[in-house]
Image (spheres, rainbow, N blue to C red):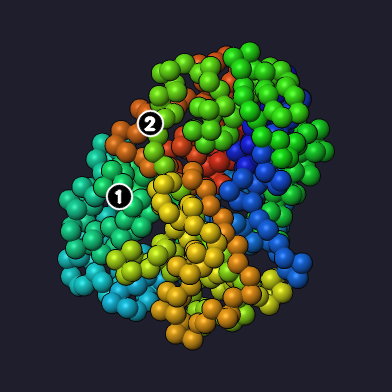
Amino acid sequence: MKIAVIGAGYAGLSAAYDLARSGHDVVIYESTDRPGGLAVGFKEPNWDWSVEGYYHHWFASDEHMLGLIEELGFSEKVRFPRPYTVMMHKGKWYPFDSIPQALMYPGLGWGINKIRFGLVGLYLRLTNNWQAMEKTTVDAWMRKWAGNKVYETMWEPMMKGKFGPHYKDVNMAWMWARMHARTSRLGTYVGGFQAFTDDMVGVLKDLGVEICLETPVKEITESLEVTFDSGKEKYDRVLVTTSPGLLSRMVPALPDSYQSGLKDLKSMGAVVLTLSISSQLSTQGYYWYNIPKEQGYPFLAVVEHTNYLSPEYFGGDHIIYCGDYRDSDHPYFEMSKEQILEEFLPPLKRINPDFDPSWVKKSWLYRTKYGQPVPEMNHSGRIPSIQTPIQGLYFASMSQVYPWDRGTNFAVEIGRRAAGMMMD
């Protein structure tokens, strides 16, 4: 078959890999100048490794991603350095990257609260019955079983930070998936995620896959004719791996019932300011700062990448991410990088009083209005099918990996699942 894949993120690349290995002619169309999707990286001339535009890592439990890497023969390039995550309580930072450390978190108090926290965490690790949990919200379930004190101290700040005004709408199956599958061991790839993407692209090209960069698709017709600026091409199968909104605009021929399902899906945007600075921000070696919005910070997290990976990989520079999730109409999506810097830099002095804006050597701003799906109650009944109503047209996005959270692991899973359906 002659197959077009729209989008060179990990879902599209993984699907193309399986399709090409099965003997099909595959062309990938990507609107930007680099493959990698939200895991795309950039690199300064004095750096040996790239840095991701949106901070990424793998969990030790990411079987789909790590399995693909093993198939490709690149497992020896995967690394699992030891990171340190902390959370704030009364102006101080406390370790927060394991159940035992979380149990020692002073914000919980003592006695019954710690017991309830531990039992809830254990239950979510052991149970597989997520279907029952999507019938209620994180807010309601946690208040009932963990208690108000535990929920308001441990999980509510994260929910508010990640989902903003929608935090009370998120169903409990989403939280189950995070706690059930994730580990405190975080992995990366030698050279950065862009190095893995480039290695994978090399394999795809050896298999005969054509990758057309800077080629945005304008329209896909009911007859699977793909139109772009330079012309049009007809295909036997088309896989779209973009956002639901972009698919809706790209394929106006989709029936109203499928279109309305796409438009009903909610999501948050992501804003990430990356800084190259001259000195270490966290002299304690902390990697990930979970920051409750009530503390007055303009972002959800500060991630000191070079407390996870050596600054030697980046020419001695120290790399900092300041990241946040916001509704797509938030001012952050219209502000200039200079305005974002004015907003984001002053609070860094609360992490390190010695920090000064003069430390900043260079900065980068990455924004996407489709960064985090918002799964409401009974979300499983609202997920668009991978096989669309148009014969031969398929759709695979992070809005469909539910109950799992978005990330490269499940991008690989849904891309390969879609490829299997296309070949069946």
**Residue 164 location, x and y as percent?**
33, 52
Seen from the viewer's position, the closer of residues 315 and 309 is 315
Q: Which mark is residue 286?
A: none
Cα distance, mark 1 to mark 2?
Answer: 17 Å
Q: Quadrant of the C terminus?
A: top right
Vertical placement of residue 97 versus 375, above or below: below
Q: Which mark is residue 264?
A: 2
Q: Quadrant of the N terminus?
A: top right
Q: In terms of secondary structure, where does tag 1 sit?
A: helix
Seen from the viewer's position, the closer of residues 186 and 265 is 265
Q: For the point 47% across and 25% down, which residue is it?
A: 385
Which residue lies under the disc numbered 1?
Answer: 165
Quarter-wise, where is residue 190 in the image?
bottom right
Quarter-wise, where is residue 26 in the image?
top right
Q: Earlier in the sequence, mark 1 or mark 2?
A: 1
**Residue 139 location, x and y as percent?**
24, 50
Q: Amino acid at mark 1?
A: Pro
**Residue 187 location, x and y as percent?**
58, 59
347 relative position to 222: left or right: left
328 relative position to 127: left or right: right
Q: Amino acid at mark 2?
A: Asp
Q: Answer yes or no: is residue 81 visible.
A: no
120 relative position to 45: left or right: left
Vertical placement of residue 248 versus 104, above or below: above
Q: Answer yes or no: is residue 343 visible.
A: yes
Q: For the point 56% across and 23% down, which residue is it?
A: 251
Q: For the point 58% across and 81% down, which residue is it?
A: 358
Q: For the point 36% across and 40% down, which residue is it?
A: 375
Seen from the viewer's position, the closer of residues 95 and 201 is 201
